[in-house]
């Protein structure tokens, strides 16, 4: 699939290993574990009674340093199946998010077993359907590993998961699991795309992947190549691409529900396949090893699109993935160049490393031309968002508070944290240009806000929200559902947003 000439791509290389048929996990609720599970996870709170069957009391657990704190694990020696205790924290604090995280922690601790069982924490506050959903998401996301390029992967492929529930909860848990499996698959698709090295996944490859998967997920996909982008007048995407040996691609995807009843949502994703900074070259520090993930926004949108039909989404969703790498070369765009966006706005380039907003402006204009009820964009846009909110929380902006509130509400069931930052109009003048309509670089402060202000000018006044995921796109360590590497942040959030969307005007 990959087209890069300088890499010898392994013969069976697949850009989305998570979709391989042998990766399908059989997840089901049970009222008693079968004899097949190799490991059983038992959630233990820090204060309530130790569940019976564990065979150890609090004192014995404390002696070996296990006190039930969230994230702790303890492998109990004994005959098969292996019991693995997982800390759930204080009983009164157990939420759906806690269950997702502890399920993820257990799945990783049980990494040598292909078949696992899980006994969830007792809680009346979370219903059976939610428990099924978050447990499925946690286990699948926790167990996720990108091992496509290891010649001898050490990972044992997960085959089956049994979730222990009361008989009365089987139906609810089954429904929740079905949802969780689809959502986790979407996030895994996003992770695979973001984890794939830039030479193995060019913009052209990404387009080919989208085309090849469209039918199986009930999507219509169209690819705009360089010639088409010239015809469309996408001067931002073309300008950023100018230094690259690889062609740009705009991938447009449409999901049309059988029964469209909740409006039309447009999604725009930043798809910088690799961000070298261009002529404003980045230094070779470890952060820039991560710039293969600069298409994390486009990956999240693509992941989300794969879930909509299976979840019965009633909102029409159009997606625009703006894909190219950002490279320095003799043909690269330069500081001082002026690019013309689709629609005619001229932009002075003051820094070629502020490329994300340049590819996004064309996508936003094209999205607005469809006259959707709202536009949501997602981009690994600014280091400033990472500085302000760290790796756990994305920055959210918007011009329509009702839409922003819908995105905020969607983030709580998926536990993809975000925080709204102000779209402070006072800072707009920092983007003024002497020779063009706007510059692509603001002042030294509030970099996430000035980037958002830039984008806001291309949405034609439509309700719009913007997610800056520069911080949340990856995790440096395993941490609950956020496994080390690309997190797939945004895939589940966009699904939830589309599923709960209602037009705001
Ligand atoms: N892709 C980067 C932003 C980024 C930084 C993502 C760290 C993930 C982690 C973006 O294209 C960029 O280079 N932004 C510049 C903008 C600046 C030149 C105005 C930045 O944040 O430094
Ligand atoms: Mn950049
Ligand atoms: Zn970038």
Image (cartoon, rainbow, N blue to C red):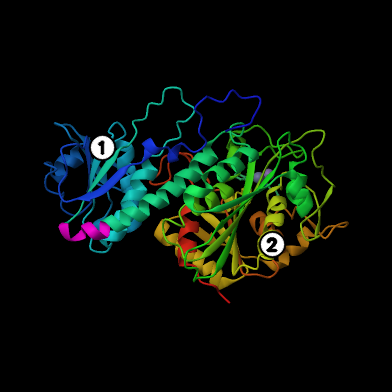
The N terminus is located in which quarter?
A: top right
Mark 2 nearby-residue class (10 Å; few <14, some 14–19, many ≥20): many
Q: Quadrant of ligand 3?
A: top right
Residue at mark 2: C-beta within 8 A of ligand 1: no
Q: Secondary structure at mark 2?
A: helix
Write the start and end of the magenta stretch as one range. Answer: 167-173
Drawn side of residue 456 relative to residue 378, left or right: right
Q: Position of residue 320 (x, y in %)?
A: 62, 54
Q: Secondary structure at mark 1?
A: strand
> Disc 2 designates what residue?
453
Q: How many marks?
A: 2
Q: Position of residue 343 (x, y in %)?
A: 78, 61
- Considering only order in the chain, which callout, 1 or 2, is on the residue closer to the N terminus? 1
Q: Is residue 243 above or below residue 408?
A: above
Drawn side of residue 30 relative to residue 293, left or right: left
Q: Main secondary structure of the magenta part?
A: helix
The C terminus is located in which quarter?
A: bottom right
Front residue of 225/77: it is 225
């Amino acid at each position: 699939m990959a087209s890069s000439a300088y890499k010898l791509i392994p013969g069976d290389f697949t850009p989305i290993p998570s979709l391989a048929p042998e990766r399908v996990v059989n997840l089901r609720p049970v009222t008693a574990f079968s004899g097949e599970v190799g490991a059983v996870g038992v959630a233990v709170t820090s204060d309530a009674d130790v569940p019976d069957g564990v065979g150890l009391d609090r004192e014995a657990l404390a002696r070996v340093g296990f006190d039930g704190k969230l994230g702790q694990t303890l492998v109990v020696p004994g005959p098969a199946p292996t019991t693995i205790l997982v800390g759930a924290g204080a009983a009164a604090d157990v939420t759906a998010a806690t269950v997702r995280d502890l399920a993820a922690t257990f799945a990783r601790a049980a990494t040598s077993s292909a078949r696992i069982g899980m006994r969830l924490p007792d809680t009346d506050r979370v219903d059976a359907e939610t428990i099924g959903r978050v447990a499925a998401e946690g286990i699948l996301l926790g167990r996720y590993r990108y091992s496509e390029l290891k010649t001898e992967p050490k990972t044992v492929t997960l085959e089956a998961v049994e979730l222990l529930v009361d008989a009365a909860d089987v139906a609810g848990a089954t429904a929740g699991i079905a949802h969780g499996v689809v959502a986790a698959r979407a996030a895994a698709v996003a992770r695979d795309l973001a984890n794939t090295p830039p030479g193995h996944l060019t913009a052209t490859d990404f387009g080919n992947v989208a085309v090849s998967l469209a039918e199986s997920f009930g999507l219509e996909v169209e690819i705009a190549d360089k010639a088409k982008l010239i015809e469309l007048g996408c001067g931002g995407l073309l300008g950023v691409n100018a230094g690259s040996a690889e062609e740009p691609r705009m991938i447009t995807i449409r999901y049309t529900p059988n029964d469209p009843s909740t409006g039309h949502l447009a999604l725009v994703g930043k798809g910088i396949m690799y961000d070298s900074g261009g002529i404003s070259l980045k230094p070779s520090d470890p952060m820039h090893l991560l710039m293969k993930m600069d298409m994390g926004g486009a990956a999240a949108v693509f992941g989300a699109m794969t879930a909509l039909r299976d979840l019965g989404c009633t909102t029409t969703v159009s997606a625009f993935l703006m894909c190219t790498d950002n490279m320095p070369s003799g043909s690269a765009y330069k500081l001082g160049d002026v690019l013309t966006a689709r629609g005619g706005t001229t932009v002075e380039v003051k820094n070629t490393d502020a490329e994300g907003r340049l590819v996004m402006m064309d996508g936003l204009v094209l999205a607005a031309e469809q006259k959707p009820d709202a536009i949501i964009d997602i981009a690994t846009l600014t280091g400033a968002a990472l500085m302000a909110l760290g790796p756990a929380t994305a920055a959210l902006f918007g011009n329509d508070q009702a839409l922003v509130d819908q995105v905020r509400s969607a983030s709580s069931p998926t536990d993809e944290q975000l925080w709204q930052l102000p779209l402070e109009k006072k800072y707009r003048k920092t983007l003024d240009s002497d020779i063009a309509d706007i510059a692509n670089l603001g002042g030294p402060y509030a970099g996430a806000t000035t980037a958002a202000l830039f984008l806001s000018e291309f949405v034609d006044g439509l309700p719009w929200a913007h997610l800056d995921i520069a911080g949340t796109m990856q995790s440096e360590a395993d941490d609950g559902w956020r496994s080390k590497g690309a997190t797939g942040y945004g895939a589940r959030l966009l699904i939830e947003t589309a599923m709960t969307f209602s037009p705001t005007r």
